[in-house]
Amino acid sequence: MIAEPTTRFILPAELSAAEPPEARGLQRDHVRLLVAGGNGIEHARFDQLGRFLVPGDLLVVNTSGTLPAAVDGTRIARAGVQPVVVHFSTALDDGDWVVELRTAPAASKPVLDAIPGERVELPCTGDRPGSLTLRARYSAGERRLWRARVDVPDGVLGFLARHGRPIAYAYVGERWPLASYQTVFATEPGSAEMPSAGRPFSTALVTRLVSAGVLVAPVTLHTGVSSLESHEPPAAERYDVSAGTAELVAWTRARGHRVIAVGTTVVRALESAVRPDGSIAAAGGWTELVLGPDRPASVVDGLITGMHAPDASHLLLLEAVAGSALVQRAYDAALERRYLWHEFGDLCLLLP
């Protein structure tokens, strides 16, 4: 059982961004930016990010690319044949996948009555149908996520490229192409859902930041499906922090500059690479780290993040970086100014 965040708010349905900003007539980097820190609350546009950074600050970004991880399938169950949407979450080391079954056609609810051994028929590639078989619950007490054996031609990534689409939830009114779910930093496909804090960055904005002396370093963390059901802890995720990035983080901190994570995924990756003595070194593999009151952030000094739902476990991570009082002030201000939530919404820069 993880601690619950102390940040409290009610999210009006109309503040959920239902479409990419481009569909609202905005450039990617023209979404709003709320800046919360020692100077209070400021409101800006995302392409003005450089106003709040100084030469020597380090932005750490996630290079994971978004997969077209949602596929229509047919569940072969005791009660009969049933259409479902399969969300492919995470590739495991033994070739199995973590998957979630959701109701068709809109994936609005998780399917919770599946049992081990059930089979789901998947779309055909050529004349060969695909399938997956549920093997076991992914973890003790888990109701949504399954370990599954997947049988498809040419491997799962090739299958998803042919038949998949980006995972989207009920607040997104229509289907958008995979390009709408990629960031400019994406180089390695592997995330079930977009590392969305990186979405508002444009090539032009990154160029301006680097030209002004702001440093940029990569990590990789492949996200699984988000925990939309109340206060579920984050599942284990695959990550990699290179020696070069670890050295640059240490160099930045030693000189009194700030390490600013672009997204909660980056915080989790960097903090997973922290050694017992507080230093950071190259690390990778699987992380089960959950940040919170008993494990605050130790190498991350600031965070660029989207606006998270009231029951999201991400809020606990925000509080571990910025403190609960600052997060609460930021969310109160965002609601007052009617910022937009979720992956296509506005952004917040927390600078405790």
Image (spheres, rainbow, N blue to C red):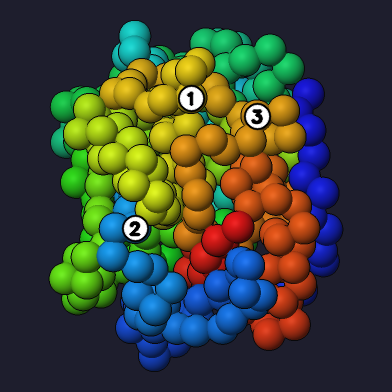
Q: Which residue is mark 2?
A: 57
Front residue of 277 and 18 = 277
Q: Position of residue 142 (x, y in %)?
A: 68, 21
Badge 2 amino acid: Asp
Q: Residue furthest front?
A: 255
Tag shown at residue 184? none
Q: What is the secondary structure assignment of the residue under circle 1?
A: loop
Nearer to us of marks 1 and 3 is 1
What's the CA distance linking mark 1 and mark 2? 20 Å
Residue 152 can be seen in this image:
yes
Q: Is residue 340 left or right of residue 5?
A: left
Q: Which residue is mark 3?
A: 295
Q: Position of residue 36 (x, y in %)?
A: 61, 69
Tell me the quarter of the image containing the N terminus.
Answer: top right
Q: Which residue is mark 1?
A: 278
Query: Quarter of the image holding residue 313?
Result: top right
| Marked residue nearer the N-terminal end (3 or 2) | 2
Q: Position of residue 147 (x, y in %)?
A: 50, 17
- At horizontal 38% and vertical 68% (from top left) the residue drawn is 53
| Marked residue nearer the N-terminal end (1 or 3) | 1
Q: Position of residue 159 (x, y in %)?
A: 25, 36
Query: Quarter of the image holding residue 316?
Result: top right
**Cβ–Cβ below 8 Å for labels 3 and 2?**
no
Q: Is residue 234 above or below residue 326?
A: above
